Image (cartoon, grey):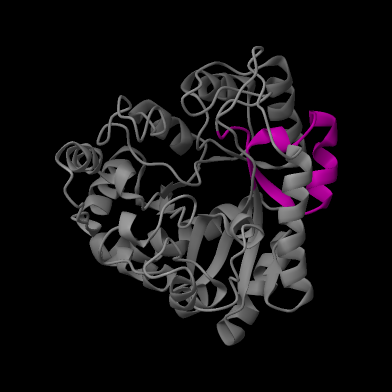
Amino acid sequence: MTERLVDAHLDMAMNVLAGRDLTIPAHEIRAREGGRSGCMTTLPELERGGVAIAFGTLYVGTNEFDADGNGVYRTPPGDSARKQLDVYRSWEDAGRIRIVRTRSDLADHLAAWETDRKLGIVVLIEGGDSISSPDELPWWFDAGVRLIGPAWSQTRYCGGTRRPGGLTPMGRDLIVAMRELGVILDMSHIAEASFWDAIETGPGRVVASHSNARAIVPGNLVITGDRQLTDDMIRAIGDHDGVIGLVLFNGFLTSEWEAMLISSVLTRTATSNFVTLEHVRAHAEHTAKLIGWDKVGIGSDFDGGLGADETPVEIDTSADLARIGDVVPHEARAGVLGENWLRVLSEALPS
């Protein structure tokens, strides 16, 4: 069978709204933007790379907060998310992609993909502030959202990256509403206290779309903060039969990346990319040792604030994602590249 790759975290709509034409090859975008820019993911690159499914995000996040700890947004977060959703819908209407909403959609898409290589998109909300309240969740579900990461940084629902704290009462209500509707809970970016509150509340299916191991890259670094998963968090996701997507950002793969950046500033010397797929192997093996190779996948986060100079040297664009399979055991290759995520979708999507 042809390898079917899945990338569980791509901020494509955000990049379109920022002005990128993702219907052309990445190198054309780099030329337009003045050389080797951050662009790694476009529809042609995903097609060349054999990516059958991508989790396309509706990203809403902020690092600004008012005196009460509420996020400060330039655009209402719900409006921003709806505009991103419209990007995927417009691609679907133009015949460029298929939005996967149900198990039957998934089966039909994978059968058609064998011939046409058209990308399937599963819609993922990243940043819960785009949902005004749990009562609004059915609207988003009907619109096609199948995964929600309640946090990027702090939201009305929970603590997030660099903003510690537990679930709010509204956050607990959201977890319950997600479970009842069958929406998958994405634990990436969620603060540790909120993580455990969510587990206690009783979620449905749990995954981490794009997270690496804190045991390898600690949580006391400027780049990572508390972004990575502890071993206990990894085990908890495994206990819920979830998959963890490996992030391919150098700063999340090795602490030496941050040390090099600091040194380059202090010494006024140029940086150089020394990170390789061996660093990816370390995170994959660590995660698999804790919960098994059947729960390891890819969540590259390409173009989510990082670019070609900040990812392993063997990966130039999304067309190269299959190379990750070269650093995992042969018997785990198909699962890590995509089949593990496909299993989750085939079990968790509505019928």
Number of disc labels: 0
Taking the spot 63% from the left edge, 68% from the top edge, the residue there is 120
Q: Is residue 155 magenta?
A: no
- Left or right position of 272 against 308: left
Taking the spot 63% from the left edge, 30% from the top edge, the residue there is 203
Taking the spot 36% from the left edge, 68% from the top edge, the residue there is 36
Q: Identify the image quadrant of the N terminus.
A: bottom left
Residue 17 seen anywhere in this rendered image of the structure: yes
Residue 91 sits in quarter: bottom right
Residue 23 horizontal/vertical position (percent):
60, 76
Between 205 and 78, the one lying in front of the other is 78
The answer to whether residue 189 is above or below residue 71 is below
The answer to whether residue 41 is above or below residue 94 is above
Residue 351 seen anywhere in this rendered image of the structure: no
Residue 111 horizontal/vertical position (percent):
63, 78
Q: Is residue 149 magenta?
A: yes
- Left or right position of 92 against 42: right
Q: Looking at this view, name the residue that lies furthest to the top.
A: 68
Between 194 and 106, the one lying in front of the other is 194
Residue 185 horizontal/vertical position (percent):
61, 38
Residue 274 horizontal/vertical position (percent):
18, 55
Q: Report the span colored magenta.
A: 125-152
Residue 230 sits in quarter: top left
